[in-house]
Amino acid sequence: MQRTRFGDMACSIARTMDVIGEPWSPLILRNVFVGIARFDQLQDNLGISRKVLAERLKWLVEQDVLERREYSARPPRHEYALTAKGTELVELLMVMVRWGDRWTAGEAGPPVLYRHHACGRVAHVELHCSECGQPMGPGDVDVLPGPGSAT
Amino acid sequence: MQRTRFGDMACSIARTMDVIGEPWSPLILRNVFVGIARFDQLQDNLGISRKVLAERLKWLVEQDVLERREYSARPPRHEYALTAKGTELVELLMVMVRWGDRWTAGEAGPPVLYRHHACGRVAHVELHCSECGQPMGPGDVDVLPGPGSAT
DNA sequence: CGCAGATAGTTCCCTGAAGGAACCCACAAG
DNA sequence: CTTGTGGGTTCCTTCAGGGAACTATCTGCG
């Protein structure tokens, strides 16, 4: 669809979307995170076209979000795993889940729950300030130009 | 591109992507958040096609993420504003910004900074547990099936 | 050996969404 | 009554997504 490339924009949202903004990418990462990590498993689970799946996996590996590794040499078999960069993207997915649960889950309730290791309770993520630890949402901040802003 | 609809999947990530997963949607929301809220302003700022912009705005209004309001009756002039549902999406954008800053900003550094009202410091968002307040990332949770999971 | 089966893709064609430019309409100001 | 501005709509082209078929490599089995 001759899409505009976002990778060169001076905007971290655009650059993030450039990496995982294509349809399916977040779902692929989620599946790899929960252990659905092989080509055919992903294809079955998502119902994605094999062609598009191959393209996405290649792109995500190039972007260093996933790595492709051999889990059997003979016969050669591969699976995908999250890198550190990819694991941090899962935080983004957790926030997506939170929003989807609140606004789109409907009567049935959320499809998955998280149990927090530290406290043992079923919980969801909240945004806090890295400096003072207090809650920090869209209404709690001033937006300032940073060093990498366009002139 | 005859895209697979994600809206009916039993997955909050898919349902969230159904609402804002199209290219440009997050950037439109970001701009509305920072006050770039009129059709022509958005078009200039993003370099998006007018056609696609009109489609996206219509969709986001239908999804109750934006509202279209008249700021002048004669001549009729409109601008877009975030609803409560849309404002919570900005949290998601803040997490995207955080990831983009860490992994894609390069030498120039982050294009924007957030100053937290509560403590006055420049900060970024972190994920904490809604129950105990401790940090909660992908490695700190067990994923359990919830009430809305597919059978 | 020859063949089925599993894994991991690649190739082909078709459709429909994104890009881009031009066009349109209501209204106001000069 | 022409020009300007906001806020879109129309039309055409191109390329990405969907889907199904095909390929390649190795293993195990009769």
Image (tube, coloured by chain):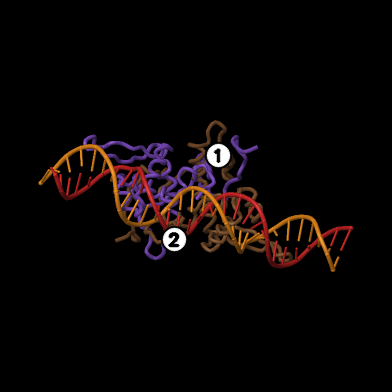
Chain colours: A brown, B purple, C orange, D red
Task: Judge whether residue A135 can be spotted in this image.
Answer: yes
Residue at (48% x, 53% y) in the render: A21
Q: Judge depth for marks 2 and 1 and give the one in front.
A: 1
Q: CA distance from mark 2 to mark 1?
A: 32 Å
Which quadrant holds the C terminus of chain A? bottom left
In the image shown, does C24 or B3 lie closer to the viewer? C24
Which percent across, then down, holds residue D29? Answer: 86, 58
Tag 2: amino acid: Thr
> In the image, which disc is placed on residue A25?
none
Q: Secondary structure at mark 1?
A: loop
Residue at (45% x, 48% y) in the render: B22
In the image shown, does A57 or B101 lie closer to the viewer? A57
Q: Chain of mark 2?
A: B
Figure disc tally: 2
* Residue closest to the far top: A107
Residue picked out by circle 1: B8
Q: Earlier in the sequence, mark 2 or mark 1?
A: 1
Which percent across, then down, holds residue A9? Answer: 38, 59
Which percent across, then down, holds residue B5? Answer: 53, 44
Mark 2 neighbour class, 10 Å CA radius: few under 14, some 14 to 19, many 20 or more: some
Query: Are labels 2 and 1 assigned to the same chain?
Result: yes
Tag 1: amino acid: Asp
Side of A110 where C3 appears, left or right: right
Residue picked out by circle 2: B104
In the image shown, does A73 or D7 lie closer to the viewer? D7
